[in-house]
Image (cartoon, grey):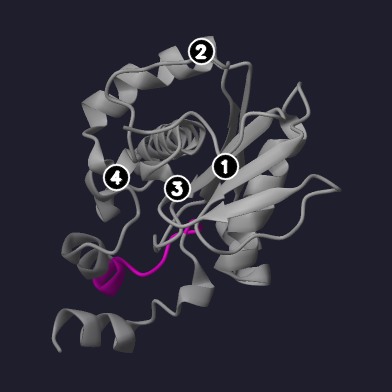
Amino acid sequence: MLQLSWQDTLLEAGCDEAGRGCLAGPVVAAAVILPAEFKLDGLNDSKKMTEKQRERLRPIIEEQALAWAVAFVDAKEIDEINILNASILAMHRALEQLHTPPQFIAVDGNRFKKYQDVPHICVVKGDAKLMNIAAASVLAKTHRDEWMLKAADEYPQYDWQKNKGYPTLAHRKAVLSQGLSKYHRRSFHINELQTKLALYP
């Protein structure tokens, strides 16, 4: 069973991101501060949940959280500063949008850059350990999926309504035949040769 937060003395925000391994679209991060008595059946690492389960929990998290925010870093910014820095930037942007400033930050993973003067802890697989990080993972994932579905209407040839920008076979084949869209990450070197190598090793 997940515990609420890393510590219970300071007001803690959980942070997580979605879309780091995608070929297209933004990386999206969420920051969530949960109330002390928060409980939510089914809450877990968003990757272990179905789309339907995530969509069911999203409005509950948004309604019951003391504070929550979601932030985006687009493909152009990712290309300029790299995906790791973009992921951290997205988390910082989400934290900046919280109407209640956190006193402590719990971050999924093992890399983070200090946010203002707020102490933080990096928790490997934190989205399967802490409810505030799991809640952030659900919000980041559902908001990003929503963005990709809208982008799929603009670029239906990439099958984003199914793959959400991840490097599936259909997505890579579409890049090979159609080229890149304005939402693809150029720094991921999705050129024709590498796509061919990925498809036909």
Q: Earlier in the sequence, mark 1 or mark 4?
A: 1
What x and y, as percent, mark residue 26? 52, 51
Q: CA distance from mark 2 to mark 1?
A: 19 Å
Q: Secondary structure at mark 3?
A: helix
What x and y, as percent, mark residue 127? 41, 43
Q: Secondary structure at mark 1?
A: strand
Q: Which residue occupies 36% across, 70% down?
A: 179
Residue type indicated by callout 2 = Glu
Residue type indicated by callout 4 = Lys
Residue picked out by circle 3:
126
For the C terminus, the quadrant is bottom left
What x and y, as percent, mark residue 128? 36, 43
| Residue 100 falls in image quadrant | top right
Relative horizontal placement of residue 76, taking residue 114 as reference (left or right): left
Q: Which residue occupies 32% across, 58% down?
A: 166
Above or below, 90 against 12 in this view is below
Checking the image for residue 37, the label placed there is: 2
Q: Earlier in the sequence, mark 4 or mark 3?
A: 4
Q: Earlier in the sequence, mark 3 or mark 2?
A: 2
Is-magenta flag for residue 176? yes
Residue picked out by circle 4:
47
Q: Which residues are magenta?
A: 175-183
Residue picked out by circle 1:
15
Residue type indicated by callout 3 = Gly
